[in-house]
Image (cartoon, rainbow, N blue to C red):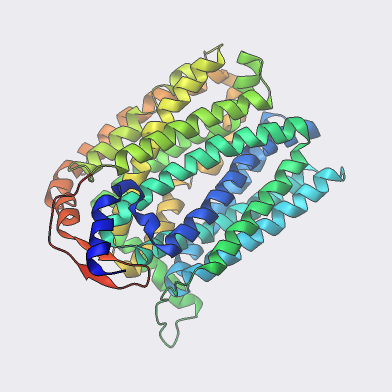
């Protein structure tokens, strides 16, 4: 393809889908689609598998808490691996391990031998797989695309994730559980990770790992790498302030969303797996709407303020979930929450890839998950008992109202409103007018207004 043709393609392709022109990103995107649909299947299959075994909110809390504990326990190691090893190899191994775990759990379920401790142990290993996959994905993405396409790429991923993981996956999971069994849905989830692994194998990118020093493989060196990441986060106000907010945010909302929601659907609406799947689908469609909307424009000038206010006040509709007696009310509330949450996540992912130096992206990404999700196991573990003690409606009311106050404190305390003005990113996106074709060739073009 000639340079003029490439220029015409750039200007004629909508900004939101421009990253799909790159072969390796397309393959990565397809693999993510498959595995996220599987993760959505898991959300429904797990809840009804626990119920089928005879468990309740406390048992579901245990399993989900151990999954998040696996993520938190290994994510720092996953960040070091992302900065030291080829990221594609790390992601491939994580996919294969998760596939093996899910296929084993599905087989145990279908043969009638599955117990709660099997699900708990399997969930812990699945969380560990996520801990290695996610930092490597964050570190790899800037190597696949030009910098000015990262917002669109994160928007595509943000659109893909809720549509697949909270919409299509749960809907298919509800159908699979109703028509077959939870075990069949778990087996299907395992197969999706095999599809993701196949897409990674088909990619041609060779991600560069950092060249280690003589003691580069020692434990001391690994701890030095982690310390370097911690120091960078501590000295960077927009990072530590956002992560402290996320720590409290996750504690407040994740338990109610993932543990109490199935029981709110069952007790208040009289629904089952199908209705639960539809409620999660509403959250997913809202997330897709928010991600696609935010990525179709330039990064907001007040990007930190917009991001934190989206997260903080976007949870207000959760206050109505515990009181709702109609499924459509719960669906509308989850759609609104999903819209705000996903839009903020797209901005955050873009900031990590554009404001964090390349050699630190994996470790900073892992610290992001470690700090912000450190209390997720606590949220999962206490949500069930709190729901029993205080009532589901009260827990959802607190989860909806409190985050807004936390967001205001996170913005004004460290003066992030000043930081975002001192470090503008929208102009950089306008000036960075180059095109990189699938072979990696960079084509410089005259600066021109972006059509989006």
Can you see residue 403? yes
Q: Percent position (x, y) of residue 396?
A: 49, 22
Compared with 363, 299 (above or below) is above
Q: Percent position (x, y) of residue 221?
A: 44, 77
Task: Please identify the quarter of the rendering in which residue 135 is found.
Answer: bottom left
Residue 174 is left or right of residue 371, and the answer is right
Task: Please identify the quarter of the rendering in which residue 55 is found.
Answer: top right
User: Where is the C terminus found, in terms of image quarters?
Assistant: top left
User: Where is the N terminus found, in terms of image quarters?
Assistant: bottom left
Which residue appears at 55% of the width and 47% of the height? Answer: 36
Residue 278 is left or right of residue 370, and the answer is right
Q: Percent position (x, y) of residue 138?
A: 41, 59
> Considering depth in this image, is 1 or 154 the residue closer to the camera?
1
Compared with 26, 359 (above or below) is below
Which residue appears at 57% of the width and 37% of the height? Answer: 168
Can you see residue 75? no
- Work out which residue is located at the far top of the displayed protein and give it: 325
Which residue appears at 78% of the width and 36% of the height? Answer: 181
Q: Percent position (x, y) of residue 297?
A: 25, 42
């Amino acid at each position: 393809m000639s340079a003029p043709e490439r220029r015409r393609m750039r200007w004629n392709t909508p900004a939101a889908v421009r990253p799909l022109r790159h072969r390796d990103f397309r393959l990565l995107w397809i693999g993510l689609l498959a595995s996220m649909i599987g993760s959505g299947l898991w959300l429904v299959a797990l809840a009804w598998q626990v119920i089928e075994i005879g468990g309740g909110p406390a048992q579901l809390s245990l399993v989900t808490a151990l999954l998040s504990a696996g993520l938190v326990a290994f994510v720092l190691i996953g960040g070091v691996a992302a900065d030291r090893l080829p990221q594609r190899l790390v992601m491939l191994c994580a996919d294969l391990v998760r596939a093996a775990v899910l296929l084993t759990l599905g087989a145990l379920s279908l043969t009638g031998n599955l117990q709660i401790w099997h699900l708990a142990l399997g969930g812990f290993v699945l969380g560990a797989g996520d801990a290695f996959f996610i930092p490597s994905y964050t570190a790899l993405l800037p190597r696949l695309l030009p910098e000015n396409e990262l917002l669109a790429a994160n928007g595509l991923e943000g659109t893909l994730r809720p549509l697949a993981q909270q919409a299509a996956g749960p809907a298919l999971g509800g159908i699979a559980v109703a028509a077959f069994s939870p075990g069949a849905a778990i087996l299907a989830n395992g197969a999706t990770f095999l599809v993701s692994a196949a897409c990674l194998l088909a990619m041609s990118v060779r991600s560069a790992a950092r060249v280690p020093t003589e003691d580069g493989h020692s434990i001391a060196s690994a701890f030095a790498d982690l310390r370097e990441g911690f120091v960078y986060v501590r000295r960077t106000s927009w990072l530590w302030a956002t992560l402290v907010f996320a720590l409290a945010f996750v504690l407040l909302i994740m338990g109610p969303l993932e543990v109490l929601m199935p029981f709110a659907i069952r007790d208040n609406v009289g629904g089952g797996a199908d209705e639960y799947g539809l409620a999660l689908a509403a959250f997913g469609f809202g997330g897709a709407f928010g991600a696609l909307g935010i990525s179709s424009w330039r990064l907001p000038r007040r990007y930190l303020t917009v991001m934190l206010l989206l997260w903080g006040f976007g949870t207000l509709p959760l206050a109505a979930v515990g009181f709702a007696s109609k499924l459509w009310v719960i669906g509308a509330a989850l759609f609104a929450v999903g819209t705000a949450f996903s839009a903020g996540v797209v901005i955050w992912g873009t900031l990590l890839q554009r404001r964090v130096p390349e050699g630190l992206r994996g470790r900073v990404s892992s610290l992001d998950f470690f700090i912000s999700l450190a209390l997720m196991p606590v949220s999962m573990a206490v949500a069930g008992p709190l729901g029993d003690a205080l009532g589901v409606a009260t827990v959802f009311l607190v989860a909806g109202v409190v985050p807004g106050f936390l967001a205001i404190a996170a913005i004004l305390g460290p003066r992030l409103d000043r930081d975002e003005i001192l470090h503008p990113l929208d102009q950089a996106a306008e000036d960075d007018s180059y095109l990189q074709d699938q072979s990696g060739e960079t084509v410089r073009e005259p600066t021109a207004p972006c059509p989006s």
